[in-house]
Image: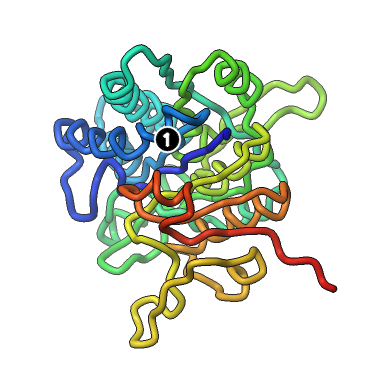
Amino acid sequence: MRIVVALGGNALLHRGERPDAGLQETNTVRVATAIAALAHDHELVVTHGNTPQLDLLAAESTADAALTAPYPVDLLGAQTQGMIGTLLVRTLRAVLPGRRVVTLVTHTRVRSDDPAFDRPTQLVGPLYPEKAARFLATKYDWHMVEDRHGWRRAVPAPSPERILEADTVRVLLEMGTLVVCAGGGGIPVVSDWATGALSGVEAVVDKDLAAARLAEDLKADFLLVLTDVPNVYAGYGTPDQRPVLDATPADLRHARYPDDSMGPKAEAAARFVENTGRLAAIGALDAAYEIVHGRSGTLVRPDLPVA
């Protein structure tokens, strides 16, 4: 099978951990071990989150007195693709000796008229006190929103229209290469309607939705969304919490999972299954092999036809 594996943002940095390079390198061993068994039998494309790394680079760029202006978010995202990609490639090569493994910096085309550009929602960078937030908003024309303990910058999160390097990824797969790509949802770009020229935009594409788009573009057989819980839960965090072992796209949408946690993962799985008629699953990183073989996680399958 051809499988697109979407690693959660906690794969390289667990909640509460400091974003030290050595710690992330250590955590990649767990990632590589979890997916190595799949790589022996299947074509694999691995995508990953980048939120902690992007926040760190955004904070450093804003504070750097040598710059006349902070780096735009799309370029910071490109930096995280290279950094995380090389950590994953090194470790995957170690656990899969003789296997071709490559990381590819990828671009995600979005629509310039996407409504998300009028409603910035994705938080990026550090917390600021109100006075500093107002100063930065005025100086750089940033949209700042109040968070739990201060103020943060918010940028648009447009929907992915196409992964521009999908054809290249397909060629690499046909050569037997394991490909790491579309990190952090890919670098968001818009194309000129007349010339096709690409321009980066100050935005962040949801990593799970980008993985679903990539899986569709690659005609993948399976979308595997890995996170830090064993499956999707109905009533998560309540006394009525129960695991959801089997679901359709309609089931996932009806449940209305939170936008800041399971929501994007559920929507990504729903989109892929709806658009392809193939299977997706959501579950824990360490159970990747068991999920694909139906022994763990939440399986997402097409809606049954009405009789």
Q: Residue at x 36, y 56 (%)?
A: 134
In this rendering, the answer to whether 209 lies above or below 303 is: above
| Towards the viewer: 2 or 164 | 2
Name the residue located 66 percent from the left edge and 53 percent from the top edge. 273
Asked if residue 130 lies left or right of residue 163, the reply is left
Q: Is residue 11 above or below residue 182?
A: below
Q: Is residue 262 above or below residue 115?
A: below
75 sits to left or right of 84: right
Dividing the image into 4 quarters, which one contains the N terminus?
top right
Q: Which residue is mark 1?
A: 38
Q: Looking at the image, how many numbered discs can be counted on the residues?
A: 1
Residue at left 44%, top 66%?
A: 232
Where does residue 181 sit, x and y in percent of width and height? Answer: 48, 29
The structure's colour scheme is: rainbow
Q: Is residue 196 visible?
A: yes
Q: Amino acid at mark 1?
A: Leu
